[in-house]
Structures are given as C-alpha cells and as structure tokens.
Amino acid sequence: MADLDEKKRTLTVKLVYYGPAMSGKTTNLMRLHDILAADLKGEIMTLETQNDRTLFFDLLPVGFYMPSGWLVKFKLYTVPGQVVHDATRKAVLSRADGVVFVADSQRSQGVNNSESFQNLEDNAHRVGLDFDVLPLVVQFNKRDLPNILFEAEVQDRWSAAPWPIVMASALLGTGVQETFVQLLAAVYPVLDKNFSLHETHGTDLPTFVSAVVGGSFGNSG
Amino acid sequence: MEIQARGYEHALSLRELLSGITPDKLSAALVVLLNGSFRLLSANGEWAMGAVLPFAAGGQRAACNYDLETVAYLEAPSATESQLRAAAGLLELFMQSAARYFMASEMHIEVVKSDYEELQRKHTLLLESESRYKVLVENLEEHVKEQVKTIASAQQQLYQAEKMAAVGQLAAGMAHEINNPIGFIRSNLNTALSYVQKFPPIAELIKAQGSDQITAAWQAADLDFVLQDFVPMLQESISGADRVARIVADLKGFSNVDQAEEQIVNLNDNIRAACNVAANQINSRAELKLTLDELPPLRCNPGHLNQVFLNLLLNAVQSMQIRGEIHIHSSVEDQHICIRISDTGSGIPATVLPRIFEPFFTTHDVGAGTGLGLTVSRNIIVAHGGRIAVASELGVGTTFTIYLPLV
C-alpha cells in the first residue's frame, strides 16, 4: 500500500521486480536507470555478493512532482532470486503496490519460472497482499538468447492469465520500458482510487506515465 | 535477542546518513577542499557540522540530495562554486554509502528475525511431535500388555472350550451308548419284578399241598427268603438303573453339547445337575447341603455356568483334608442372584488369596490342576455381567460368592 506523507506532501509507491535467480531483474533496473527521464532519478543502490548475485535487494528511486505540488516517489526494488533468500524476498515484497515478474525465456528455465511464480503467489498471501487484485506484469526476458520459448508458445500458455505479457531483452534494453509502462498503467487506477490523483492532484494516466518515463511530458533528468 | 528493527524502508535522518564518518576528520578534509571554514545545515536549517556561527548573508550554498530530496545544505564562503559542488557530491556519496549500510543491516535483522521465528516455530512443532511420540510409546507398552492379556485370556478360553468340547463329545457318545442298554435293563427289571410277584401265591400252594420231599427241598434252598428278598433287590436295581440314566442325562446336559447359546433357566436346576455330576467325588469327602431359595428365571449360558459350579464344587472337595461339609445357598439379593458355595476345608492362605484368579496359578501338584479353573470361572461370571468374591480362613474354610445381575 502506497505511503502518503501529509507533512512532506509525498506519495511513495513501491514496485517490486520478482522472478527466478539470474532472470535479469537487476539488469531491468539498470536499464530503467538509463532510460527513464523522470524529474527526479536517484542512483541505483545494489546489495550484491562478490559474484554479482543480489544478496538483499537493489533499489532505484525515481520521482516527479504532480501539478498539485506533491511529490510522487517510486521505489523500484528487485528481490534476490535464489531459493535460500526467501525471507528477504518476503520482506521486500511486503507492502508492494505493483510487481513485475521477470521470467527467463530459455527453454531450460520452465521449472524455475513456475516455482518462482508459485513462490510469488505464496509470499503475497503471507505478507497480506491480495494476489487477485495485485497489479502485476509478466515479462519474458532474454529474448536475445537461443533456445528460448517462441512467443506464440508463451502467449498460448499464459492465455488464461489476466496479466499483461511483455517480451524483453533487458541486456539489449528492449521491452524494459514497455514492461514498466504496463506496470504504471496497472498501478495508476489503484492509486487514483485511493488518493484521487486525477481530481485532487491534476494527474491523469498519460501524465502519470510520461512524468516517470519521459516523452511528451516532463523531461529534464 | 531482542533487536527492534525499524525496517529497511524507514526514512533516514541526516545524522544517521553521516553516522559512519568521524566528524572531525571529515570537517578537517572539507576545510582544505573548500578553502576555509564551512557549515553543513539540515534541510530545515539546523546546524549539523562545521562552523557554529552563521556566515554573512549572501554566501553561496549547495544542496545535498538523498532519496530524491534535499537533506542538507553546504555553505562555504571561500570556496569556488565547482569546489562547493564537488564537496556536496562527495557528501552525497558518503550518505548513499551510509544508507546502503543501514538498509542492509535492517534487512539483515529482519531476515535473521524471521528465520529465527521460523526456527522457533519448527522447534515448537518438533517438541509437540516428540511429546506425541512419547505418549505413543508409553501407551504402546500399555497396549502391548493389554494385547498380551487378551491373547492369554483367549488362549485359556480356547483351551477350556476345547477341553469341554472333548468332554462333551465323550459324554454325548457315552450317553448314547449307555442309554440303550440301561433302557432295556430297566425294562427287563420291571418285567422281572412282575414275574417275581407271581411266585408267592404259588409258593403257598406248594408249601400247603406239596410232598415232604418238595417241602424239604424248598426249605433247603431257603426259597422263602429268596422270594422275600427278590422284590426289594429288583426294586433297588431299578432305582440304580434310574440313577445311571439320570447321571448320563445330567452329564449330557452339563457338557452342553447341544445347547451352546443363551437360554432362560432356573439356576437351581443347574446347581443340582453340577452336584449330580460331581456326586461321586463329593460323597466320598463331604456332606452336601443345599439351601436353594426360589429363583427367578435367568437368561444366561447355562453350559458355562454349569462349568463354574462344577469347578467350585470340585475345588471345595479337594480342599477337604478330613470329611467335611459343603453348603450351597442360592438366593436373590438386591437385584442379583447370589450363589454362595461354602466349604469347611483347609482354607486359602492370605498370601495366596489375591492370586487365585490369575491364569495358570495353581497350588496343586503338577498334573492335578491346570490353574485355569478359577480364571475361567471368573471370566464366565464377568461375561454375564456379574462378579465373584472369595473369603477364606485357614483351617476354617472358604466361601465363594457369585453375583449375577437379574436385568
């Protein structure tokens, strides 16, 4: 649940990149750091072990000022994918406003993907998130690699799922922004309902998205 | 371990963001980098580091940002703008590093705590399951003892039942074999009696009209006495044959070959039957005295109860060192049929008394008793919903009392 600070006139939104180990969650964040043209963009904080595996989480803060003068702060987290770090994953997922599930497109990773997705669902229940209404985007990453699932196969398998599916290669930078925009679009209605972004703060969905991502609205990095 | 975690997401103050660095050394370095004294103020203007007194108005300042927001201002009148900007950037790096440390340590505490709680939870579950197993193990011993008891008891019953079945078959066979000859013996004896009764009138005729020679021969053969003795002799034989027939019938009924199921009976009849079966043993050692009150009919397994009565009677007989008395008294007391079998035998020692109902416990010589009689007797009484009590005094005698509920 997003955090509203009346005194500092700040709305903090927590977005979490979830997924199996080595699926490219941190790479997604690094690309976003490069791509996003928000008013405010912090440095990426990474907490990794010696071999570049995420130990606790990565954090990228971005933000923009709404016409009302209020600051919207996004905190983009990644979870550690390795199975042993489940307690950390739970702590990071706690109070999330939206989740990107980063799946590994390689054919060999099917089991890891489904186990991690199941883990996401389980942990969501454990930290009190309603998985049925939680804004979620599924990203199939590593489209640049050989021996990957065909897009048609992915779409076919996930056809019954209610979540948007995005093909991406975080390494090359494709699909990363699209994934994030899809997530913003999924998160916006919930925020608008709870904090009346449109009416009180003069921020509709296109403004909201372009303020973070850049483009037609707000730019200076 | 009670560490209050504030959570890795909580906002960090300027003091916390600078906490990892020795202030004196940082100040000294900044003074050199900024060409002179400096001040570091928090976002709302509170002093944090450097010169205590404010500089003259119009001095330049640079913002230090953390987490998208300005958390401090750096003032240094003697520094160039680029020096000021560079020093502010340096402070931002320090703060970023401190924040990284804080968040990592908070997360570490959270993770350790949750792992610890998880371990505690598992530990509790393990303790629970351990105690369940303990209870199970304890009960297991009880269960095994119980089972062994059941099996032992079932074995006795089986042993006794087989013995009784064998006796019963023998008795039935004997009864069949004896009934026929005893039938014609009795019939012939009756006929013989009627024949003999034809002789006396003829004897009178012979004695009155017969020659001296005949009379002398009559007297020599003492036929007067023969005729006189013949009738009672036959009558005795008839009653003897009747007794044989009755014993055979009792034995057959007693052995219960053809009445395995429950019946409604008058227990006094069963007591009499048991006495008849044991009559020979009883008569040689003791006087039997029956005081049988009027009893209501009882639904029971008469064959089994017969066995109990016989067991107790034979025990009573065996306890007689010298000729004594056995007294059976049946009555109704307090909704129970009460059968008391007392003897004036040697009595049971107090040390032995508590054990007499135990299986295979016997004071008889090897081969003389199985040690099952009283156990089986008690089981039978218990199976009828009743109980059996014993009172005994050495040298005075023993009394077994059977209570059978009427309902």
Image (spheres, grey):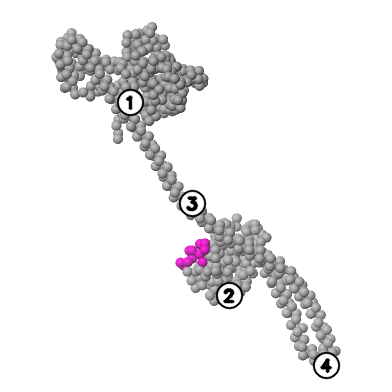
Residue A210, quarter of picture: top left
Say if A117 sits above or below B400 in the image.
above
Q: Amino acid at mark 2?
A: Arg
Residue at point 45%, 47% (across, down): B136
Q: Amino acid at mark 1?
A: Asn
Q: Between tags 2 and 1, which lies in front?
A: 1
Q: Earlier in the sequence, mark 3 or mark 4?
A: 3
Say if B10 sits above or below B354 in the image.
above
Residue at point 18%, 10% (across, down): B80
Label 3 close to label 1 by CB (< 8 Å): no
Helix, strand or loop under label 4: helix
* Residue B269 appearing in the image: no
Do the residues indicated by labels 3 and 4 lie within the same chain of the protein? yes
Say if A196 sits above or below B397 in the image.
above
Residue B334 at x, y = what percent? 56, 59
Mark 3 sits on what residue? Answer: B143
Q: Gap between marks 2 and 1, in whole Å?
A: 104 Å
Q: Between tags 3 and 2, which lies in front?
A: 3
Residue A220, quarter of picture: top left
Q: Classify residue B315 as left or right of residue A180.
A: right
Mark 1 sits on what residue? Answer: A51
Q: Gap between marks 3 and 1, in whole Å?
A: 59 Å
What numbered label is drawn on residue B285? 2
Q: Gap between marks 4 and 2, in whole Å?
A: 55 Å
Give the magenta-colored segment's residue range: B350-362
